[in-house]
Every structure is written in C-alpha cells, then in structure tokens.
Image: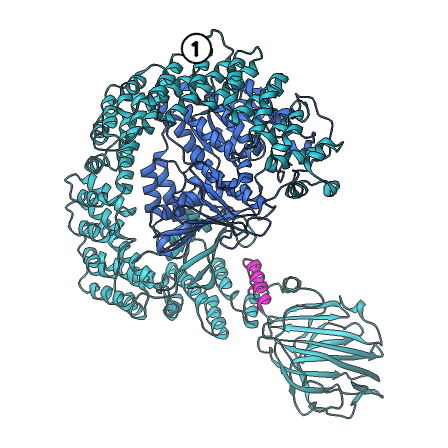
Chain colours: A cyan, B blue
Amino acid sequence: MRNLMLTLVLILAAVVPVLAQATDPVAVLESGAPDIEKMAALRALARQGGPETVPTLAALLLDEKFSHMARYALEPMPCTEAGDALRDALAKTSGKLKVGVIHSLGMREDMQAQPALIALLSDADAEVSQASAGALGRLGTPEAAKALADALAKPDLPTRTLWAFCDGLFDCAEAALAQGQSETAAAMYDQLRAVANAPEQVRTGAVRGAVLARGGESGVPLLIEALGSEDGALWIGALRVARELEASEAVTAALAAELANLPDEKKIGLIQVLGQRGGETAGPALMAQAKEGAIEVRVAAVNALVRAGYAPALELMEELAASDQSALAEAAKNGLSYFPGRDADAALTAMLANKDVGVRKVAIDLIRQGGLRAPVGPLMKAADGDSDESVRVAALEAVKPYASLNEMPVLLALLVKAKSDAEMQAAEKAIEALSERQARTPSGNIVVQKAVYGALPDGPSADVTEKVIQMVASGAMTVGASNANFGDPAPDIVKQLRVDFTENGRARSDAVPENQTLTLTTTSAPPAIVDALCAALGNASPEAKTSLIRLLRTAGSPKALEAVLAIAATGEGPVKDTATRALCEWPTPDAVPALMELVKSSGDQKVKVLALRGAVRLLKHSAAESADLVGTYSQLMDSTATADEKKAVLSGLAQVPDADAMGAVLAQSTDEAVKAEALQAAVTIANALGANAREDASLFNGQDLTGWVATSDRWRVEDGALVGQNETPLDRTEYLWASPTVRDFYLCVSVKLEPNTGNSGVQFRSEMRGDNNDAFGNQADIGQDVWGRIYDQGGRGKLDWNDRAEAAVKPEDWNRYEILVVGPAIWTAINGQLGVACLDLSSENEREGLIGIQLHAGAPKKFSYRFEKLIHDPKIELVGLNAEQLINELNVPTPQ
Amino acid sequence: MSVKVSRRSFLTKAAAAVAAPYIVPASVLGKGGAVAPSERITVGGIGIHGRGFHDLRWITGNKDVQFLAICDLWKQQREAVKEFTDNLYGNKDCAMYRDLREFLVDRPDIDAVLIATGDHWHAPASILAMRAGKDVYTEKPSCMTIAEGRLVVETAKRYGRVYQTGTQRLSEPNHVFAIEMARTGRLGKVDKAYAHIAPWDAAKMSHDWKPAQPEPPKDEIDWDIWLGPCPWRPFNREYVSGGWRNYYDFHTSCIGEWGAHTFAQAQAGLDAGDRSPVHYSYVDNDSGDGMVCTFANGQKLIFSRGDVYWHGSCGERFDGERGWIGSADGYSMTEASSPDILAEFKEVIGEYVARTGRSLDHMRNFLDCVKSREETVANPSVMHHSMCTVHAANICMWLERDLEFDPVKEEFVNDEEANRLRSRAQREPWVL
C-alpha cells in the first residue's frame, strides 16, 4: 500500500525540484535516483513508512552508504517487521554497520534480540561488544544485568569496554529501581561498587545509586561511610546523594551528626548540603559550626543558616555582624539583610538596643542599605536617643535618604542642640537632603542624559554621565565641577562641566566652569521648611546659624532670600560670611540684584568674584528679556578686569541669542586674554540667530519712486530698476532715501555702474541730515577701486578697505552686491566673492538707521539698482560661508 | 516618601553587592588567597569557536580554573585555543586532541569540559563526557531531540555529574528578578508567559546539501567526526566554519535558536523548570510566531518574534494579576508595568541569592557547583524541559497540526508520526 499521503510527504520533505514528479519513496529507493533523493525518501519513511516498506529497507541495512539511513527509517517504526529486519541484519553485518544495528535494537528495546546481544557482549570487536552493553542496558532486564555483571568480572577489559559494561549495568539498575525493585537495584549498584579498577565516575555513580536504592534511612550508614572515605569519588557521590535524598529529618540528623567528625576542608561541603536540606536538626548543627572554628567554615555555616532560613541563627548573626573578621561580618550582614521572610526585621530592630556600640552601628548600616521596610522610625529613635555620639551621627547619616517633612522638627532640634560638629553636620545634611527632595515637584524628577567634564568643547574631556547619575541618585541636586568628583581629564586647563538633563520632562542643558556648582533644579522647597528654618534661627548658636543659613540657601524661596540678605547686611563674623557666601550660591535668579550689588560694592575681591560667578550662573537660568540680560551681563563685564571672570560672563552671554549679545562678546575680542572665548561665544550666538528673520518687500515696488525721498530729478525707474544719472558733471553729491529703518539686516541688490570710474554706494543704518538730505553713517561703496568696501560717510571715513571683491566686479555690467550687517559686524560680497568682514566696534550709536543710494559728485555717470531682497534679523550666512566661518573672517581691530 | 532615583546604577550595584559574598571565596579552597593547585578545577575544551571563545575567556577568568587541553576535529581551532591558553598561562602545556573518545579516555585528570561545538554535537559530547566522569558546561541549544535531552538527564544523574547549559540569562539579575517575581507569586497569579523567538529563519529547515568539496585530511578537518551521529552528506568547508544553521540535521530552527534561552527563562518564572507544556497549537505561519503552548495547570507559554513585547533580544515576559514584568538583552534593567514592581528588585534578588546560594554569574554558578555538587541553575532537567518545548513546537510546525504531549511518558498522544520524530537514529559509530 503506497498511499497518496506518503507520496505527498515525500514531495514536501524533499527539496530537490526533480522530485516533484516522484511517485513514492520505495520507488525512489529502488530507482537510480541520486543519493540525496534517496536520503529524502528515507527521511519520509522515518516519519510515515509502514511494514510494506521494510523489505526495501532491510536490504539497505547491508549497504555501506545507506545502512544508517535505513536504520533512520526503521528505528522509530512501531511495526514488529522493523525489529525483525534489524535482528536479521545482526548476522549479516559486521564492524560499524553491526554497531549501528545493535544500537537501533537497543533503542527499540527489542526483547527478542536479548540472546543475540548477550552473545555479542563477548564479541572480539570491542565496539560491537560496547554497543551490545548499551543495548542490553536499554532492555534493562535481570538477564541483561546478569550478563553485564558476568562480563564485568572478566579481567583486563579495555577502558572503553569497562565503561560501557558499567553503563549498561547502571541502566539495568535504574530500570529495576523504576519498577520498584529497590533491592534488586541495590544489588546491582553493589556489583558496580565492587568492580575492580572501576573509574572514578563509576565509583561515584555506584555509591550514589546504592544509597538511593536503599532509601534514606537504610542508606545512611553507607552514605556516612562514603563521606568519611579517603576516595574523592565517593565523597562526590555522597555529597550528591545527600542532596537528592528525601527530606527526612532522620537523614538530616545523621548528616548533621557527622559534621563534627569531618576535617575542615570537607566540612564546608557538608555544611552546604545541610543548608540546602534545612530542617530542625540542621540548624543547631550549623549554629555550632558558625560559632567557632576556622573562619571559612564559619562563613559557610552562616551562609547555610541563611539559606535554611533558621531564624534562631539571627541572634548569632547580630553578634557576628560586628565581628572583626571581615568575611564573617560580611556573611552575617548579608544574612541579616536578606534572611528569607520577615524574621530579620525584628532582629535588626533589636540590634539597635544592643549594649555593644559596634553592633548598634552595624544595624544602622544595614538599615541604611535597605534592611528594613520602614527604616525611619528606628533610625530617628537612635539619632535622638542613643547614648553614643558616633551612633547618633551614623543614624543621622543613615536617615538622610529616607527622612520626610515629618522628621523636620526633630532634625532641626537635633541640629540646634547638637553636642558636636559631626552631629550638627549630619543633621544639616539630613535636612538638606530632605529639603532637596521636597523641592522636587511630585511628578517630576531629574533625569540626567549626558554629562561631560573637561576642556570643552574641543579639548580632552571625560564622559561622567554615570557618576552624575549616581550623585543625583543619592539625592544631590547640585553637582560640583571638580577634579575631586570627576578626576582630571585635562590637567592644567580650566575645565567645564556640562550636563544635559530633563527636569520634569523638560530638556535642559547647563554648564559651569571648574570649581563651581551646577544646580540641577530651579524649584524651591515648600514654605513649611523655610518657616521652620527661619524660626530656628532665633535662638541658635552662631555655629547652628551657619548651618541654618546654608539650609536656607538649599531651600531657596523669597522668604529664605530675605532672611539671608538680612543676615548678610547686619550680621557679623563667620555668620555674615556664610550668609554672603550663601547668596553667591543662591539657587534662584531672584538673588541677582543682591549679587550685582556685591559685585559693585563689596570690598572683598574674593566675594566679588564669587558674586559675579553666582550672578552669571543664575542669569543662565533667568527668564529675563534678552535686552535686559545683555545689559546685566555688560554691567558685570564692566565690573571685572580678570580674564577668568570675563570668560565666565562670556559663557553667559553666549547663551543669549541676540545680536546685541553678539556685539557685547565681540567687543571683548580685542582683549587677547579672552579673544578665543569671545569669538567662540560669538559663533555660538551667531548660530542661534536668524530664527526670526523677516523679509521686507516695502523697499522698492519696481514701478515708481513711491516711498523714496529724492532732492532732484536725477532719479527714475527704468525697466524695473532704480536709476540715478547725471548727464553733466555734478557739483554736489546727492542721495535718494528709502523709508524702512534697518538695524540687523541682509540686503541683496544688483548694480550696474556706467562708467566704472563713477561712484555710488548704499548707505545703511544712516541718518538723513540737513536741507540737502545728506547722509551720515555707513556706506557699502560702489565704483572702481572702492567696490565692496565700507566707508563712514560724514565722519570716520574708511572703516574697512579690503579690496578682495574688486576682482569679482564685472565693469559696466550687472553685479550682485550682498550686504550682511549684524551688531558690530559687516560683511559684503560681490558676485559671490566675500568683500569686507568688518568689525566696527566704535559704532555703538550707529546701529540703526535708513537705507539710501548715493549719486556722487563728479563726471557724468549712470547707475541702475535692482533690489533683490531685504531681510531683517537675518541668519548669519553669506556666499556659502556659515556663521563660524564668517565670524572667523572678521577683521578684529588691535587695541589702541 | 520613596526616593526617586535613576535606578540603573543603584540596582546594578545592589545586585553586585548582594551576589558577591556568596561566591565561594578562593581562600576557602586554597591557603592564603592563592588557589592551591589541588583545589583547581581542571578544564578541557571540546570544539571551541565563535561563542566558544567568549566562554573560554569567561571560564579561564576564574582563578580557580586551570585549562589543560583542547579537543577539536579542526586543526586551526585546536591551535587557536592552544595559543590562547598558552599565552594566558605563559607556558606550552595545553594538550591537543582531535577525537573526543581518545581525549576522554586519556585525561582522567580533567574535572570538567567546556563544550561549544556546533549544536548537533552539544548533547553527544555532553553525554560522552559525563560517562567519562567529567562535569559539563555546554553551549545551547543543548540537544537535537527529545530523546537526546532525556539521555542527558539520565547520564548526569547516573554519574552524579554537574551540568550547566549555557542559558546564561537564568543567572543575570535583570532576568532573575523577572523570573522570581513571577515564580514566587509576588506578581499575583501568573497565567501567561511570553517567550522571544528569533526574528529570522523559519521553523521548517533544509535537507539540501551544499556542493561537494574534496575532503581534507583527517588531521586538518575530521569530517566524519564533524557529522557525528547525523546523516552523512558530502563535505563542504562552510559547514565546519559555522554554515550549518537552518539545516534540519544540525539546527533546531528559529524556535530553538532563541527558545533554548527564552523558554527556559519563561518556564523558570512559571515554576515549570521540570515540566513541559501538554498542548501545542499550530499557527499558520513560517516561524511559530504566536504559538500558544499550554501547561497541564492551564498556564500558557506564548511565542513571539520581533519587538511586540520587548525592545531587545532573547526576552521573556510574565503577565500576572498585579501587572507585567519582563527583560531582554540590552535593557539596563528589568521593565514592568509599574515602578512599585521594580522597587522590589533588591529584596527579591537578595532573597534569591540567600535562598539558593547561587552566584549571579552563570559560569561561576557552574564552578561553585563543581565543588559543592549541587544542581546548577540550568541543570539537565531545566535544559531538557525547555528543549522539550522547543522540539515539540518544531514538530507541531512541521506536521502543521495541534499536538497533545504526555509529559510523564514524554510522548505525543495519538500521533504516531509526531512520536517518530522524538528521536533520530544515530549514525555509526557515533551511537550513544
């Protein structure tokens, strides 16, 4: 019966396209099909072949090439014919093929093959005899076992044969055990134990099996004997079976009793077993081991007691936790922290009342690490009431991450009445941490994305993200930019710390120079904290006052600021100094006016510096208008002469995206000491400009002179271009004025001048003066030998006479003339060639004005202007150069 | 109030701090800190390439390990491993073997072997090694058929051997946390676990042959050993250098590729390390994606490929009454449906380590057990019962029908064809 299903399976199983036409597997096998197709047919028969396919397979069993795959098909076949075929093949095969056939008979558990397999045990071919042992083991019958045991009695078996015979006998023993014949099994294991020259694995397996077959209690004497044996193989077997034996207390008791008889190096192994077994007798035996003896043994015993969950051991662990043997103390502490269940909570709490200071401190340390679910109560009790100062301090330090507003009154009282600096400091730190936590809005927190410390932006630096995350995780809301915190990635260079983070989901980035503090939050603590601090100020000692002032700074509300300002103004000595310093480090921008005052009027240079840095730090967070910020920064700049402070101010200005800020930083570029930083700041600002660029179409309508102011009839519109012309020599220069006012702008105009020796120019930021509408202000010049240069009409003359664009001019033809003016910077370009890059620092009063066209006095000439584009507050880019390139082109004047 | 912190560094540190003391300190074994030679675990390697080198660095990174010999049918790799370990120890002592039968007979001095052969050799090499009295650390997937897995279990028991399969996530804190939350009931009743399967390849694999090439000399590559118990096919060098994946004879499909890990992870959380599902529902796709395997108690193990439940690889996830929890490669920490679940990390890991005494380093757990003779975290039973799920699921996909499995008899109910696929006749002389 070669059914359709089988054919389909073959087609599905086969991958060779030729087989699509195949009929059925047997036909393929009997054909001259390629080997791979025959293999596919045999795979198909393995899944679905029936008795009708056996004759074909039987023939293939004798075929060197296909014998294995014939077995592949026959071995899993449920029909008896498959077994018959394999048995038949036994006599007809030898060597490897016979080994395979024997193995398949074993896999089929073919009982009829038993006599033949027993005979083959003594076959001259070692591999045949080994395979027979394996197959007999699978039969697992008493006869098979006997044959194997007899075979094992023969002397001088080759190693692998010895192993195979033993393996077969193990298999028989397991079969007997599985059938509940434990005595038979035990006898077989005993035979294995008695095998001469048995290898280690056999000795191990035999003792394991012998104990297991006898069952827990009757196996114990054998187990104990093996534990005490000099033979490592028996020791290993004993340990294993001791773990496997049922949870009988009698077995555990016997093992526990043996503990005392073992040498130290073996004790640890049995201790671990007892830890796994647990139970009533294991506990006391392990306790005894934990109490005295070699440290390694005691450590193992403590670990085992924890594992066994033996609660009476907790008291011992309380004691051991303060041991001067660090390994022992460590094990006991771990036990107390992670003891299964909740028994350890009571133990930890009880430790706080121990008479030994060391024990009490260990308890506090464990609670600090999370040993108790409710740590605050016990810790506060210790902080308030312990007789030992070091315990009180430890408790205050431990409560730091847990204390809430409820603990505030007690902590403040502890601070005010503190008997030592250490205690006061610990109380202060605890209040500080709690206040910082309270300052965080309920939904929000600080998530640090990236932190870098080093010579930013381009110098050597270190990624300190992990470290900052850790600091934040431990409650810090401020991060000191110091080598102490981050190491020194750039020796001898003043470094910066930059942190990118989110506060309540809002992305923020902040940077501070080395040795300053970066504050990660701008929110203030709730009023209750500030009120409590202010109230405590009243009758506090000067030492406590300094603590309270620092805490007020951390809290940082208007009321806190007021209190600290008052102390800074009226206090004296260290209290006043602390208040002044607190102002310099104040977390919120409302301290800026006070800091500005200190910068201006403090007599102490150090205070000035700190106040300036504090002001810069706060201004960076300020929400003030750009103009106000530039003004405030400029005042700060004016108040300092040192390069470091100037750099600090520059770093603040760099964050203000405003043309005047760019002007302010560029004004510092003439100072060699800060030139690089000033230009860098200018680039930063320049990159941020252009966000509000606006195009202005009101300049010229292309039709007529609407909106322009002329003083003669020499101006007209022709073919969409504005034309100025004098046909006869002109005595007096005149101007045509446009209506828009420009400040920071980009203008693009096409200009044609005939002849090229004539002269014109575009006035900008200029004033129209006098009856003749004369021009005062900057002019982008036009004409031979003046193209693209900047001239201050009616005043300072040639501002930048760079002739770089001259060569790009197409005489008496149209020329594309671009003018970009931002703050003190003026760039021109002609036909794509940069002309001047003028830094006009002395023009502070000429930054705004009109656009005008000049018709210069002199010989007849005609010029035409086509206005292409006027943009206010433009992005800084010109002729393919970006902001950084344009800033670097600027012609920085040397200081006079 | 609870302290809100970025958990990553905090938790990792906590886990390390918890785990460390339970690693058997070297001083217990040797005297005065250094490990005495007699206390060293002597190790040999069988078939170490690719992932195997990672394992080799891992195991030799433990100072109580002495690597003594490499057995590999491929000369190039024998020599590479010898060079590595000789450099490590500053000697020329690493012995080389081609045939593992000789290696195992010749070296009674070796305690344990590290097996990182191709998949089809993992179980045969493990069984032969344990029969020779070696403890075994083997890469996954650790057996090709249900019958092979059963034989690994029996052999390990028979000789009292310590065996660990390379499902290292069972020892990684992020996964242990998820598993223990589910297993101990902290997540409430857990009725569903999801396990990640590889997002490439299919459940049905090829029987094709690569083009025949001339067989190299045995000393260079022993092709007969490479094939081992698998059906003969003509030599092609690509198989030897790793190109055996996706072939029926050598691979356990996209299901076994990751399932060897993730089913063990998922079954551990369902407390089913010693059980296999009883029902497998066929899904009409190439991969087994979405297959639901049901345990006798009604719990479900569901396969998922791609990134539906994870944003990393080799993940597991548990759905319980209280919410879900899961982990995958690339997570800085376990993820869960709510922060209060994650807040239990330290306590759960601490208790796990205290209760089991296990190291949270998979290799270290193996080495500790070599000394203590305790079962490892990924012991033969765990390996067999998760691989049983792999094999049953594969058979379900090959036969394209639902399957019932009797986990006691380890046979399919009323499905002869499926039962025939539980084992494969081994090619002589590589019969076990």
Q: What stretch is highlighted in magenta?
A: A668-688
- Which amino acid, by three-letter code, is at mark 1? Asn
User: Pointer 1: residues within 10 angstroms few (<14), some, or many (20+)?
Assistant: few
Residue at the limit of the structure toward the front, as seen here: A1
Quadrant location, the N terminus of chain A: top right
Q: Name the residue under label 1.
A: A197
Q: Does the magenta stretch include residue A453?
A: no
Of A259 and B198, the residue lying toward us = B198
**Image quarter of residue A623:** bottom left
Q: Is residue A521 left or right of residue B45?
A: left
Quarter of the picture holding the C terminus of chain A: bottom right
| Residue A83 to residue A653: above or below | above
How many labels were placed on the picture?
1
- The residue that appears at 81% across and 71% down in the rendered structure is A809
Q: Does A553 appear above or below A41?
A: below
Q: Quadrant of residue A892?
A: bottom right
Does residue A669 show up magenta in the picture?
yes
Q: Is residue A189 found left or right of A880 in the rendered image?
A: left
Position of residue B159 measured from the top left corner of the image (x, y, whole percent): 42, 23
Taking depth in this image into account, of B41 and B166 the one nearest to the observer is: B166
Location of residue A413 in the rendering, given as x and y in whole percent from the top left corner: 18, 58
- Residues A583 and A424: in front is A424
Looking at the image, residue A18 lies above or below residue B107: below
Q: In which quarter of the image is residue B369?
A: top left
Q: Nearer the viewer, residue A715 or B2?
A: B2
Side of A15 where A213 appears, left or right? left
